[in-house]
Amino acid sequence: HADGTLASTHPLPEFADVAPETVRKCIVTVLPPPVTDFIVPYIDIVHNRAAIEIQRGCTRGCRFCQAGMIFRPVRERPLDEVLAAVERIMESTGFEEISFLSLSSSDYSYIGELVEEVTARYGDKKLSIGLPSLRIESFSVDLMDRLEQGRRRSGFTFAPEAATDRLRDVINKPIATNLMLQTAHEVYSRGWTTIKMYFMIGHPTQTLEDVEAIARLAHEVLHIGRSYVGRKAKVRVGVSTLVPKPQTPFQWVPMEDEETLRAQQEHLRRRLRAQGIQLSLNDPRESLMEAFLSRGDRRLAAVVERAWRLGAQFDAWGDRFNWQAWQQAFVDTGLDMDWYARRERAVTETLPWDHLSVGVKKEFLIAEYQHSLQGAVVDDCRDHCFSCGIITQFRDQRREAQQVLGGDGSWGCPAFGRDAERQPVSPVPVPLYFNDEMSPDRQGQFAERVPQRRHRLISAEKVLER
Ligand code: SF4
């Protein structure tokens, strides 16, 4: 179109016979065996540990998270396989640290048993276990408590991503502030001295009040820490910028403008200048670069080439970040970085990645985008499948997983078959509740805030009624 947006995406006429209209991602039905025989480095390296992927995919549905959308469906590795891999890694490599990888470790169905077994088998050996991406809840503190029994406890990480209940409803990560503070009590009372908290600024509908809440929360957590461990209490606050990503409900959202981001960062710098609090922020220009590259189209190839010719290389390294080269490359190619990064896109616009399918329907993403603007929270889809598209696109593989692994085949999506436990399936996510500040007149399934992941509370009839 004359305004630079795309009219359509389709194969060129000369490839019409061979190229599909839409290219769909491929998935593995069952996770391949974990790598256990590594080349062991003889120098200290970054990530000097072995890693075992315990689960792929996530069902929580955080609206900013690209991994949560593109790595669907959830596939879990059987417990025996994880334990056998730990054994083999210990024998073959001598690593003293193993990290269990997943997008949300607390959601791995056998996490309790896994921690139990690992502690029983290796508790007296010098093996330390990493469990990244834990939910902010007491259960996570219990898990880490067991894993780190008798060891030096350094940092405990939380990733609330936003500091007010309202904004966490917008991003569909509804952990109530009071539960977070309760978890902080548990962490410090059990001997940890540092809590790391990760936030983002630039979420849709965010105000300065939401930014100020980051500072308030950090001070509150520090105060809790001091009541248990005195001056040793530390809070590390990492604040990054939301970069809206393709294939997520935020793919239509404009990135926040630089002036606002800088003002918000300055506010945080001022408010978090306190002993015991350490703040880290990122350069808004680096986020802008990530933003135009994330949602660019093929015209950006010319920009990338031009920037490289002008000397841009390894820009992710702070000392090699060559902003002038990128600015010049946009000027030389007649394109505008803000048009790519900071323009609100209509949901009807043809997007440059519309011909790439990750299995999740665009209607699902649109519904979730609208829900975000209404402050509507939807449930974890392991408890309530919303038919986001995955189960229909990968129906045969879903069946095959049941045959290969037996039972429900370790997928998070509902199993098929007469004996399988059925879950309600509705064509669009049904909000659990609407944030009262944002949508006082709307009614979700519940009149008040309820946590996600309540085991099968929603009946199929209720969903159909709606
Ligand atoms: S098909 Fe259902 S259970 Fe599977 S990822 Fe989509 S919404 Fe979740």
Image: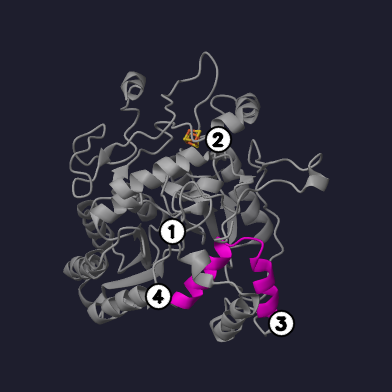
Task: Tell me which label, 4 or 1, sits earlier in the chain.
Answer: 4
The label on residue 390 is: 2
- On the question of residue 454 being in view, the answer is yes
Local secondary structure at mark 3: helix
Local secondary structure at mark 2: helix
Is label 2's Cβ within 8 Å of ligand 1? yes
Task: Tell me which label, 2 or 4, sits earlier in the chain.
Answer: 4
The verdict on residue 302 being magenta is yes
**Looking at the picture, which amino acid does disc 3 mark?**
Arg
The verdict on residue 291 being magenta is yes
The label on residue 454 is: none
Task: Tell me which label, 2 or 3, sits earlier in the chain.
Answer: 3
365 with respect to 315 (left or right): left
Which residue in the protein does label 4 denote?
Answer: 258
The label on residue 309 is: 3
**Looking at the picture, which amino acid does disc 1 mark?**
Glu
Is label 3's Cβ within 8 Å of ligand 1? no
CA distance separating discs 2 and 1? 27 Å
* Percent coordinates x, y for residue 105 in the rendering: 45, 49
The label on residue 344 is: 1
- On the question of residue 153 being in view, the answer is no
Task: Tell me which label, 3 or 4, sits earlier in the chain.
Answer: 4
**Magenta segment:** 284-308
142 with respect to 45 (left or right): left
Pick the front one: 423 or 358? 358
Question: Which dot, 2 or 1, sits closer to the camera?
Answer: 1
Q: Main secondary structure of the magenta part?
A: helix
